[in-house]
Image (spheres, helix red, strand yellow):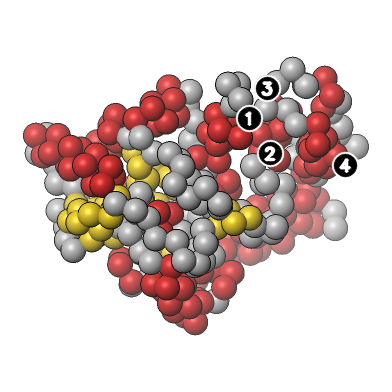
Amino acid sequence: MGKKIKMVIAGAVMSSMIATNVYAFTDDTLHRSSISFIEKIVSFITSSSNKDENVSHDFSMYNDIYYYDSNNLSRYKSFSAKNPNVSPEDIIWLVNANLDRNFYDKAEKIENTEDEIILVNKYNYLPNDYVPKNLVDIENGKQATEATAKAFEEMKENAAIEGLSINVVSAYRSIDYQKNLYKQYIKRDGKELADTYSARAGYSEHHTGRALDIAAEDMDMNNFGNTQEYKWVAENCWKYGFIIRYTEENKNITGYQSEPWHITYVGTDISGVMHNQNISSLEEYFVKYVDYSVNN
């Protein structure tokens, strides 16, 4: 399909979708699912027209990068050909994080569930019988790990000094709970749409007891991104060991739409590195500081 024809199709699709204003919203735990079909179509057409199979880097020249993995050389080349505007350094870590594969493709079970940091995403899932240790009450009848609850309490208290109210809407979820929730979303919106805003059972960070969905005083998660509380959290949560896990910036990495209300406890050492090194996703951190750590 020629580039001009693709752009005509994109324009027609955008005009049609804007006219009908197609959006969907979830109601369970106030979880938003503002999927944009326009974005998906334009992204597909743009990415297709930008492919240049003739573009190739000699990735063997980058073997001095400590997270370079010679076992992934062919994958680096293939992924780079499809993404010619991405730097070789980024291609390497993206492939190491399995982002050259479709989400859920060749997903692996997490074996070391008690590690200091657990990467739960669309390529790594928790065992069916997994329940985190040291769950404690955190707020509003919710539970989280002891470390998560303690860090949140400190953050909440310091926010209150600034006249801000931060509250927990959702915290630990069992795998069975997530299974039923995901089924409800599929029944209502279909699997493709549900996958953009809800995790499949076993693949949710909420299983770890380290993820919190938060809101301001109005308890409206959907509105949290528009509040002063969100601005404060975005600037300060790293000081307490939290990260905003699903951002607009990293949605193509995580596979989830932006969720300004979803914070994940990773500890102050990790959140500090991510903040100082401008790392926006746990996937990038995991490749550079866990799987291929210079200390390994």
Label 2, label 4: how many angstroms apart (C-alpha)? 21 Å
**Circle 1 residue:** 292
At mark 4, the secondary structure is: loop
Q: Residue at x 33, y 71 (%)?
A: 28
Amino acid type at image mark 3: Tyr
Q: Pointers 3 and 4 in contact (CB under 8 A)?
A: no
**Circle 3 residue:** 66
At mark 2, the secondary structure is: helix
**Circle 4 residue:** 53
Q: Earlier in the sequence, mark 1 or mark 3?
A: 3
**Circle 2 residue:** 96
Q: Pointers 1 and 3 in contact (CB under 8 A)?
A: yes
User: Where, quadrant-wise, is the N terminus in this rendering?
Assistant: bottom right
User: Of tags 2 and 4, which is closer to the observer?
Assistant: 2
Q: Which of marks 2 and 3 is nearer the N terminus?
A: 3
> Callout 3 environment at 10 Å: few (<14), some (14 to 19), or many (20+)?
few
Label 1, label 2: how many angstroms apart (C-alpha)? 9 Å
